[in-house]
Amino acid sequence: MTYVLKMERKHMSAFALYQTLSTDLPTPAKKPSLQVPTKKKKKKQNGVADSKVNTAKSQIKSVKKKMRKKALKLAQGEESLQGITEQKEECVNGDGEALDTLLSDLAKVNNSRERASKLFQWLISPIPAKSFFRDTWEKKPIVVQRNSPDYYKGLFSTAEFDRMLREEDVQYGVNLDVTSYTNGKRQTHNPPGRALPFTVWDFYESGCSIRLLNPQAFSSTVWNVLSILQEQFGSMAGANVYLTPPGTQGFAPHYDDIEAFVVQLEGKKHWRVYNPRTMDEVLPVLSSPNYDQADIGDPIMEVVLEAGDLLYFPRGFIHQGDCLPDAHSLHITISSYQKNSWGDLLQKLVPAALEVAMEEDVEFRQGLPLDYLTYMGVQNSDKDDPRRTKFLSRIESLMKKLPNYAPVDAAVDQKARDFLHDCLPPMLTPEEMASSVQGAPTRWEHGQVMDVGAQINSKTQVRVLRAGCARLCSDGEAVHLYYTIDNSRVYHKEELKSVEIKPEHTDAIEFLIHSYPKFVTVESLPCDAAEDRVALAELLFEKGIIHTAEPL
């Protein structure tokens, strides 16, 4: 009888169970920076306040009801949709080119830079890329409403998300967040461990939003798209996926430290975008904390995105999105340009310039005045002392000399190494696979090894695999060729790979890099001896850095 009573107890949802047990759970480990492009510095509120289950659910229902009322007003046109810039297209690319067809066509493009340019143009179509980067990039938000719900079909879907939960090791806090925003309070509800469908969908049914932090680790299509786009940006391209139940909101108003392309995949979502509040928040270095509605003023853009639409906003623009009552929302935010400013380059350049200056210029090594502590420093800043003027003049003079010692190319190479480490590995096209070490025919067959040691000779035509897949850098003592081929789809899971290059072979590496996208014969490599050319080509082929014009 006791057993029957236990079986008949009312089901407690995952959301309710989490609220009951949240204070007993260990504090989740801090999320590592994933291939997400957003390394947010926001203060997270992990866990929720202890409260009774019915109270928590009633709060969510109350907010959902308010959102439904506002959404209905929007749908009926009682509130204006104010877009800074709005592009409307009845039909783009005919009925919208299917993504798998587009990617298949792009795989046949011989130049990876051209491939990236074409894919980016598809992303923002019908806006020309040239005018976008001239007029909109880093300046203002823009929305593209296409009236073509299948435009982005194939990029990601709720069905694909469900498959991932069932088949992949998706971990709370690492790969997935469960969030809510009710009564002005943003909360995270991550239990420990693996995110399984039974629990995740229960959270969703309770009104929680689901954020997938690194879909490229699980979806080959997202991986392919991002690995191509990173060549367009010259900076890491990341993504998050957001699934929101009808009539709810998952996140508080905030701004990010990335350029954001919000791609609406399913359903629809009501967005509000706000200007940066001060000049200090224009193109910010870090993401913001969560804001209250009273902190942010009136929106400069208010729009409902439907499937096939796109919203772009620069870093620093405050934004919030809530779901309409009649449909769920699934969107993917593609992001880039995190920590890719002039200031970020100067953070590497200025210390290096100072180090060189101190080695080469005696003025930088001369001692400070004996009594400088008596008239400099904050406690002396209000003094009207001529010694202060002289001291500041000397500082200005030394600062003006600093650019003469700035190793700009070396600092750029440091940034390039960081970028290569951030990069996704390339997803190889069928032609690249067949003509590279990954598709080499060496195999075990009929009890023996077959086609081992396929030889590269002086007549073999080769080129680097992708335009941006490798870079030659020197640390002052040795020269290394850094490459992305062996990177992980999970952000920084692997160390950046490199191979040391002999000084006499650096000209040959530069020749290969600068020859792209043309194939060149091994015998044309500028090495001293024929055997050196072949040996270098074999090394680069084995590392996956080059491929051949025809399969070996």
Image: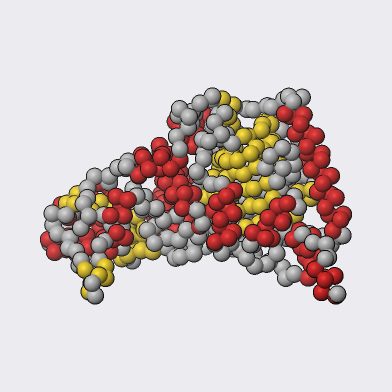
- The residue located at (70%, 52%) in the rendering is 204
Residue sitting nearer the eye, 285 or 53: 53
| Residue 269 showing in the rendered view | yes
Q: How many numbered marks, from 0 up? A: 0
- Residue 189 spot, x, y in % from top left: 73, 59
Query: Is 541 drawn above or below residue 2 in the view shown?
Result: above
Is 7 placed left or right of 450 in the picture? right
State the residue at coordinates (31%, 60%): 438
In front here: 551 or 313?
551
Residue shown at the point (61%, 63%) measured from the top left: 171
Q: Quadrant of residue 324?
A: top right
484 w.r.t. 241: above or below: below
Please identify the quarter of the rendering in which residue 173 is found. Answer: bottom right
79 or 534, which is in the foreground? 79
Residue 57 position (above or below residue 307):
below
Q: Residue 196: x and y, percent? A: 63, 62
Q: Quadrant of the C terminus?
A: bottom left
The answer to whether any part of residue 258 appears in the image is no
Residue 379: x percent and y percent? Answer: 72, 56
Identify the image quadrant of the N terminus: bottom right
Q: Residue at x 53, y 36 (%)?
A: 150
Q: Quick check: 486 left or right of 83?
A: left
Task: Give left or right: position of 307 versus 5.
Answer: left
Q: Which color scheme does this rendered protein use?
A: secondary structure
Horizontal and vertical percent for residue 531? 13, 64
Of 180 and 491, the residue lying toward us: 180
